Amino acid sequence: MGSIPDPGELTELTQPSFDEFQRQTSLMTSCTLLWKELSDHINSLEQNLMKQSETLKRKIEALDSETKASLDSLKKRELSIEDSVKIALSRVEFNTKAAMRTLGDDVEDNPDGEVDDGDGLLQHLKSTCLKMEAKEFWSFVIGKKKEIDLLREKIPAALSECIDPARFVMEAISEVFPVDKRGNEGGSDLAWACVLILESLIPVVVDPVIGKSRILVTPSMKEQAKEIAETWKKSLEERGGIENVKTPDVHTFLQHLVTFGIVKKEDLELYRKLVVASAWRKQMPKLAVSLGLGDQMPDMIEELISKGQQLDAVHFTYEVGLVDKFPPVPLLKSFLRDAKKAASSILDDPNNTGRAAQLAARKEQSALRAVIKCIEEYKLEAEFPPENLKKRLEQLEKTKTEKRKPVVVPANKRTRVNNGGPMPPAKAGRLTNAYVSSFPAPPPFVRSPSHTQYPAPVPGYPSPPPMYGSRSPPTNPYAYSPEAAPPPLAGSYPGAPMNYPAYGGYGNGLAPAYQQAYYR
């Protein structure tokens, strides 16, 4: 039998190859990389699980907090019902007694509705509210449009005297809302009065304990308010949809919803379209928030910007606090650029050749005033200094004023329309520009019905002296219109030659019976 070799002894064994060593090394390296990759993956999973766990924990805490707040609010509302009802009943009882006293007294009402001051106006409003005379109240309000600020201040106090303010208001505005019962002979728009009265009703019907979160309107009145809203929506379809409805009517409808707390979630898309279509109205941003459109504000602002209503978009951004997302200064500058483009398009329009310059200037002036007002309202002077805008506005207004003034021209010269420089004498047969003659202009060209003739007869002219010399020209020289004069009529007098000197004196010291020329 062969002997077992001693491990310590060197034997003739097969030596490991270098390739086998490299394979083992590569295998160890791969195992190390796989282990590191698995470790990183496991650590990443652990971190993600920790983050999700923290997120869930925060959400659970927020939910618990909201639940607790909602339960506390419900408990407070439940406990406040009794107190609110007591306050409302006491107010009704007080107003009922006051109304009975008013009806029993011989109060001398002013049939013309003339009121000397704010106290008298408030007294008259309270009288109609105590007696629940809604029609008289309505007639008085619409007759005081010039005192709208005073009405806005006094109407809430007067409505608080009503036994049922909600019923009183709906009856008062029923003549024009939800549909105008005056027909085609309705006359002026009275939506401003509806909005004013509906706004004034809000502080009267809010819960005295909780506030605006609860509107103290009886269920029957709330159902009637809903019926009125449905009637208006049906009339909207009859009038051709949102595109054909008047903005004041839209404002009244939306204010009606907010005042009586009858906003419907299923009608949010309708509210959104109405708000965007009437976005230029000052109260629309606040109404949009009250209607529950706060989440849709970013999309609404982008829609306004795409329609070229950057100025309205600025008001919406400030109302909902999206100034960082929609910076106001670039929007205002874009609005001005669009206004200048619109003014240029008016100048290029061949259909407005007569009034193109006036319309274009008015367009640019309106845009400048609106932007300046917006800068001042939101304190943007540091980011958008309004000095250059004010200078441009003054320049446009000055140009408009100068165009209205007659141009004073010496009798022997004509001036260019553009720069006031002298022009060469008109050649025979060229009457493209009106010029001033030293003789009276013929009647077909000259008229001024607003000026009276001098009573003195026209004296004869003395011999023509030299030119003015050191004296000033006559105070009433004939001015010509910067516009081109009409072609001469048949049989009219030809224009006087331009080399006639001006007559400096008058026979008896009176000015001749000439009138200033106005071309119309």
Image (cartoon, rainbow, N blue to C red):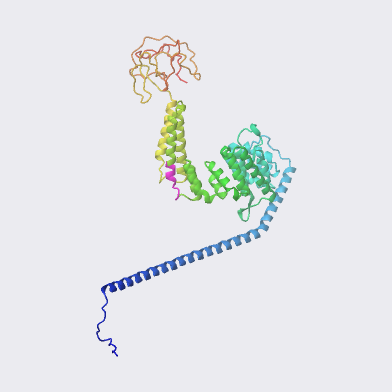
Residue at the bottom extreme, as displayed:
1
Quadrant assignment, res 32: bottom left
Residue at the spot 65% in from the left edge and 59% down from the top edge: 78
Q: Main secondary structure of the magenta part?
A: helix
Relative side of 111 to 315, left or right: right
Asked if the magenta segment contains residue 96, the reply would be no
**Residue 6 location, x and y as percent?**
27, 88
Q: Compare residues 224 and 375 and report the one nearer the observer.
A: 224
Q: How many marks?
A: 0
Q: From the viewer's perspective, is residue 67 above or below residue 227?
A: below
**Residue 280 location, x and y as percent?**
52, 41
**Residue 261 location, x and y as percent?**
62, 50
**Residue 487 location, x and y as percent?**
43, 16
Res 281 visible: no
Q: From the viewer's perspective, is residue 223 above or below residue 516?
A: below
Q: Compare residues 378 and 516 and report the one nearer the observer.
A: 378
Q: Compare residues 454 and 497 and report the one nearer the observer.
A: 497
Relative side of 141 to 46, left or right: right
Residue at the right extreme, as displayed:
104
Res 374 visible: yes
Q: Which residues are magenta?
A: 324-333
Q: From the viewer's perspective, is residue 231 above or below residue 26?
A: above
Asked if the magenta segment contains residue 326, the reply would be yes
Location of the N terminus (image quadrant): bottom left
